[in-house]
Image (spheres, rainbow, N blue to C red):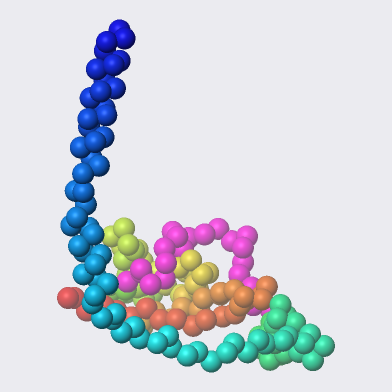
Amino acid sequence: MKKINIVFLCLLGVFLLGCQKNSHQDIVDFIEESKRKQPGNIKALPVYAPYKPYVYNSTQLRSPFEPPALVKKKVLAASSNVKPDLDRRKQRLESFDFAALKMVGTLKKGGVLWALIRDPEGSIERVKPGYYLGRNHGLITGMNDRNIDVVEIVPNGLDGWLERPNVITLKERE
């Protein structure tokens, strides 16, 4: 066992002596050549205007968490008795987005004009004034051969409701 250790140490010494030879001459040459070259030009950094901090003086300005006074006036003007009937049983077409519903035709039955609406699932349903459609409590208020007039009740963003008129127009075949 001692002989193996001695042989191993000798081989290790020979190996280390072989590494000591000046085998890094290419690196030394590269460094010398780099030192002889002219240094490159570096662009100067751009000059920026100094930052001017904004001091918020709460005694002179309104709180950033309160709506502006103009919005309050609009809310008072828009606040009325408009609100959806949340206790009413929903109709089938109220489960679809308003934009996804298409008017595909009309028919007259018993003196009553009915509009034909195609939903995104491909089903066609008859509707007339007084029916609801769309997710925003859209009530059909009137119709003719080409249009269905709808009034939607949408939230105004300030715990109230607004009426928004909308129209579904008959789509010609494509």
Residue 108 falls inside the magenta stretch: no
Q: Position of residue 19 (x, y in %)?
A: 23, 40
Q: Which residue is located at x 62 percent, y 66 percent?
A: 85
Q: Where is residue 28 in the image (x, y as percent from the top left)?
A: 23, 59
Which quarter shows the N terminus? top left
Q: Is residue 132 left or right of residue 102?
A: right
Single out the residue that lies furthest toward the right: 59
Asked if one can make out residue 146 in the rendered structure from this viewpoint, the answer is no
Q: Is residue 137 left or right of residue 157?
A: left
Compare residues 49 and 111 and report the one nearer the observer: 49
Compare residues 126 and 37 and report the one nearer the observer: 37
Q: Which residue is located at x 53 percent, y 69 percent?
A: 137
Q: Which region of the structure is painted magenta?
A: 81-102
Asked if one can make out residue 113 in the rendered structure from this viewpoint, the answer is yes
Which quarter shows the C terminus? bottom left
Q: Where is residue 107 in the image (x, y as percent from the top left)?
A: 30, 73
In the rendered view, would you say 43 is above or below 90?
A: below
Q: Which residue is located at x 32 percent, y 73 percent?
A: 103
Q: Is residue 73 left or right of residue 34?
A: right
Residue 37 occupies quadrant: bottom left
Q: Which residue is located at x 50 percent, y 89 percent?
A: 48
Residue 9 occupies quadrant: top left
In the rendered view, would you say 166 is above or below 8?
A: below
In the rendered view, would you say 76 is above or below 27?
A: below
Residue 93 falls inside the magenta stretch: yes
Per the picture, the main secondary structure of the magenta-coloured stretch is loop
In the rendered view, would you say 121 is above or below 12?
A: below
